[in-house]
Amino acid sequence: MKEIAPDMKQKIKSIAIQLFYQKGYHACSISNIAERAGIQKSSIYYHYLNKEELLYGILKDTMDDLNQSLDESLVNVKGTEARLIAMIRTHLNFHMDRQKEVIISDSELRGLTSDNLRSVLRMRDDYDRKMRDIIREGIAEGLFINRDPRVVANAIITMCTQSSLWYNPRGNLSKEEIIDIYTKIIFEGIRDRK
Amino acid sequence: MKEIAPDMKQKIKSIAIQLFYQKGYHACSISNIAERAGIQKSSIYYHYLNKEELLYGILKDTMDDLNQSLDESLVNVKGTEARLIAMIRTHLNFHMDRQKEVIISDSELRGLTSDNLRSVLRMRDDYDRKMRDIIREGIAEGLFINRDPRVVANAIITMCTQSSLWYNPRGNLSKEEIIDIYTKIIFEGIRDRK
DNA sequence: CTTTGAACCGAACGACCGGTCAGTTTTCAC
DNA sequence: GTGAAAACTGACCGGTCGTTCGGTTCAAAG
């Protein structure tokens, strides 16, 4: 069951992900993390500058991976609609695959101070902008309903993001089924057209 | 600018709402609240049993009000679709009117211990069930797409809930406009049908 | 065998936490 | 004006927080 000793820095990080997710950043102490890692809390400071750097590392890496996943999923995909479909699929997959990290990312931003906060917010803005832009394109092409693209993009993103909160990998719904339902709702709505 | 001294118990509560929203429950101390209220932190304990009771009071009242709003908005509304439309409108209005409280409700559940947690979760389940049931009805009547009602209900609820995170009362979009956009997306999707 | 550097330990730091309590002030009915 | 209840104070408690630091361990390199 136990993995064969990954290097401690990574082990600390994955324990932090688990605990920040479970109890929240401020409710989880360095001692808690050290305890689980089987070391003294002072040893944490050999690997990380302070508690915030531990949080920042999690948020930064998650946002980096998210942005990279999005970019990768879009290479060689042509057409506004196909691109939006790919983005939705990637967003949902990522949020169902990395539930703990994205939940931390969405709820513990307040734990960051100025510079780190700015850095993460910039990454998030980059991501959101890609979504807004594709909606804008679709509207310009007459494909999508002509409504405020910020609202539409927000509606789509937040809806998909929340899948991280309730998706159960051991449940009876596959990720593909969920992606299908969401894509259908986003494009066609819930009204049955027979 | 300053209101004329509401009773202190209520004043403490509204300061707590502001601070729990701004900094998070665990990052906000009783001293912080007392400071803003212009009293000593020990005085908080004259009005509230402990910190958790303060949080519980916020969550409980918010959930009560939310459930009551929903029920009120449904009296004399007949028909599955009309009822769902009313529910969406009420949900959105509530989440845009009471942003701070619903954000606390959605992010600080972990601050509650067993009994209080159970109590709030029961209220939330009651609310969610009403949404699931209406979706189920619509599917049974052939009005809505035949997909897992839990997923569909979750998609709708979470999408609308997140409006609390970005809606700006001083922005250039009215609540009515936002309700229109969301209702349109939920029923018809984003695809333009000319 | 010695040296070195990475990894970790253990005790301590000041600050602050939520909470308690005996006592003081304020309010207000009589 | 008096008495009692309501509201609030200020000092204090034990505990935990994030962080520091001098010292220890130990494997590998020379």
Image (cartoon, coloured by chain):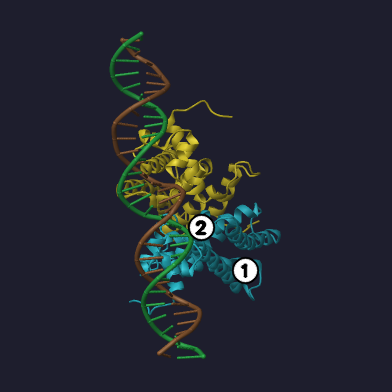
Chain colours: A cyan, B yellow, C brown, D green
B120 lies above or below A67: above
- Mark 2: few/some/many CA within 10 Å (<14, 14-19, 20+): few
Quarter of the figure that contains the C terminus of chain B: bottom right
Q: Nearer the viewer, residue B136 or B42?
A: B42
Chain of the residue under the numbered disc 1 shown in the image? A
Q: Is residue A83 left or right of residue D22?
A: right
Element carrying mark 2: helix
Q: Amino acid at mark 2?
A: Asp
The answer to whether the residues at label 1 and label 2 have Cβ atoms under 8 Å apart is no
Q: How packed is label 1: few (under 14 Cα within 10 Å), some, or many (20 or more)?
A: some
**Numbered label attached to residue A83:** 1
How far from the left and from the top, in percent, is residue A171? 37, 66
Residue A68 — which label?
none
Instruction: Give the vertical position of B185 relative to B37 (above or below).
Output: below
A167 is higher (above) or lower (below) than D29: above
| Pointer 2 residue | A106
Q: Report how far apart the C-alphas of labels 1 and 2 lie in the structure.
A: 25 Å
Residue drawn at point x = 35 percent, y = 65 percent: A35
